[in-house]
């Protein structure tokens, strides 16, 4: 199935039903009076995150969505039925943007999240509503208001704990195949990976994390070169970036130091936040480097980079160092999630205290 992560659609909420003008005319009831009912409200349109939906590809074939219109009112004070709401299923991790104003409407990050994107119209009033002591037979009604129309841009961002980045053929797909059950395509030519792949890494103690393999970046990616920024956005939700470097490139002119600097420049050009995100350096394909020069070669690369972060030496092909790296990642993610939980609790306490202070001031 083709991976689609950005689409544009049009949504139309249902219009409200019109009010009815009617008078009660029955035998032996000389003063029936007005009995026109109100119309029904138009249906709202929602987006809902569903774990069964993995891509936005269905929206390539259906781009217009319209909720049901409210029914018109009828005589005998009968109100029209409200239009049925329309719920459109989208993948988890979908952001909804107003395509005209470029405003973020909402973000659906977990199963069951529901977002109102178009409000249905208000019902019209029947003539019974206008009856008064001075107007016993009103001939006035109102029409229902139109439902909200919007053009939306839906962007799907993968929800992963760890993101893999690096130049083409750095060994990202081989690594994710080694540590998870994901089966991305692996070959000896650039841009083998054309779409992001997700893999679940399960530890022996049953803990697990999700790792995302995105297509390789090239110089100028933030400006649209290569696959451009099409997949860079998938790294923004991750808690940790693994920067994979080919230490034994087929092209002898390709310098590992320059490879790292190219990628980091593109990250900063795309987003300051992404450029400052936690990043570990993964020196890959160590099995291709002779053991007698391996340590000296790695130290030279690190010295030229002046790398201050964590460094791991692995071989995705034979699995060397992969288990130890995954264990370190798991421990790191546990610490980050614990810190996030504490921060969230502090925010809730601060919000409650603010509400209490506001209540005391009102008194």
Image: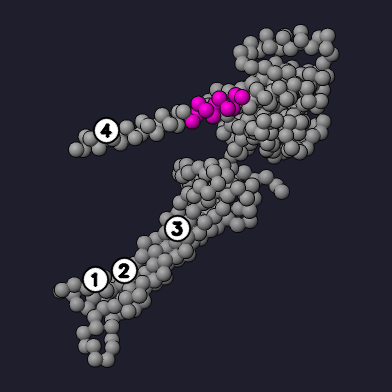
Q: Earlier in the sequence, mark 4 or mark 2?
A: 2
Mark in front: 3 vs 4 = 4
Q: Is residue 118 magenta?
A: no
For residue 252, side relative to residue 49 (left or right):
right
Name the main secondary structure of what is drawn in magenta.
helix
> Would you identify the image quadrant in which residue 361 lies?
top left
Work out how far the residue at label 3 is from the one at label 2, CA to CA, in angstroms: 19 Å
**Residue to which mark 3 is pinned:** 44
**Residue to which mark 1 is pinned:** 130
Q: Nearer the viewer, residue 215 or 209?
A: 209
Q: Earlier in the sequence, mark 3 or mark 4?
A: 3
Q: Position of residue 245 (x, y in %)?
A: 72, 22
Q: Are marks 4 and 1 in contact (CB under 8 Å)?
A: no
**In the rendered structure, which segment of residues is drawn in magenta?**
331-341
Q: Nearer the viewer, residue 123 or 312?
A: 312
Dot 1 falls on a residue whose secondary structure is: helix
Residue shown at 76%/10% (left/top)?
295
Residue 60 appears in the picture as rendered: no
Q: Are marks 2 and 1 in contact (CB under 8 Å)?
A: yes
Work out how far the residue at label 3 is from the one at label 1, CA to CA, in angstroms: 27 Å
Mark in front: 4 vs 1 = 4
For residue 67, side relative to residue 177 (left or right):
left
Q: Earlier in the sequence, mark 3 or mark 1?
A: 3
**Residue to which mark 2 is pinned:** 125
Label 2: how many Cα within 10 Å (few below 14, some 14–19, many 20+): many
Residue shown at 81%/9% (left/top)?
293
Q: Earlier in the sequence, mark 3 or mark 2?
A: 3
**Residue to which mark 4 is pinned:** 357
């Amino acid at each position: 199935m083709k991976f689609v992560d950005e689409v544009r659609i049009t949504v139309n909420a249902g219009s409200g039903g019109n009010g009815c003008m009617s008078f009660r005319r029955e035998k032996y009831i000389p003063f029936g009076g007005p009995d026109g009912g109100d119309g029904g409200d138009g249906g709202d349109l929602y987006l809902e995150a569903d774990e069964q939906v993995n891509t936005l590809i269905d929206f390539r074939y259906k781009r217009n969505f319209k909720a049901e219109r409210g029914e018109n009112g009828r005589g005998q004070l009968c109100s029209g039925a409200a239009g049925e709401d329309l719920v459109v299923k989208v993948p988890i991790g979908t952001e909804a943007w107003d395509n005209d104003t470029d405003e973020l409407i909402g973000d659906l990050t977990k199963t069951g999240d529901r977002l109102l994107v178009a409000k249905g119209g208000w019902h019209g009033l029947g003539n019974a509503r206008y009856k008064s002591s001075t107007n016993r037979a009103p001939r006035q009604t109102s029409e229902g208001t139109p439902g909200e129309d919007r053009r939306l841009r839906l962007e799907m961002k993968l929800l992963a704990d760890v993101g893999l980045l690096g130049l083409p053929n750095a060994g990202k797909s081989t690594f994710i195949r080694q540590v998870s059950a994901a089966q991305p395509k692996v070959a000896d030519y650039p841009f083998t990976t054309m779409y992001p792949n997700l893999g679940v890494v399960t530890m022996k103690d049953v803990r697990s994390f999700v790792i995302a393999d995105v297509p390789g970046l090239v110089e100028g990616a933030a400006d649209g070169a290569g696959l451009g920024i099409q997949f860079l956005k998938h790294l923004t939700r991750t808690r940790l970036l693994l920067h994979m470097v080919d230490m034994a490139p087929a092209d002898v002119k390709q310098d590992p130091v320059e490879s790292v600097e190219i990628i980091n420049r593109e990250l900063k050009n795309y987003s300051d936040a992404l450029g400052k995100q936690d990043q570990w350096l993964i020196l890959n394909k160590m099995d291709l480097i002779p053991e007698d020069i391996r340590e000296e070669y790695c130290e030279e690369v690190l010295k030229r980079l002046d790398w201050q972060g964590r460094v791991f030496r692995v071989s995705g092909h034979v699995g060397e160092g992969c288990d130890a790296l995954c264990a370190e990642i798991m421990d790191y993610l546990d610490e980050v999630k614990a810190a996030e939980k504490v921060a969230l609790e502090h925010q809730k306490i601060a919000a409650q205290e603010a509400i209490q202070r506001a209540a005391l001031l009102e008194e």
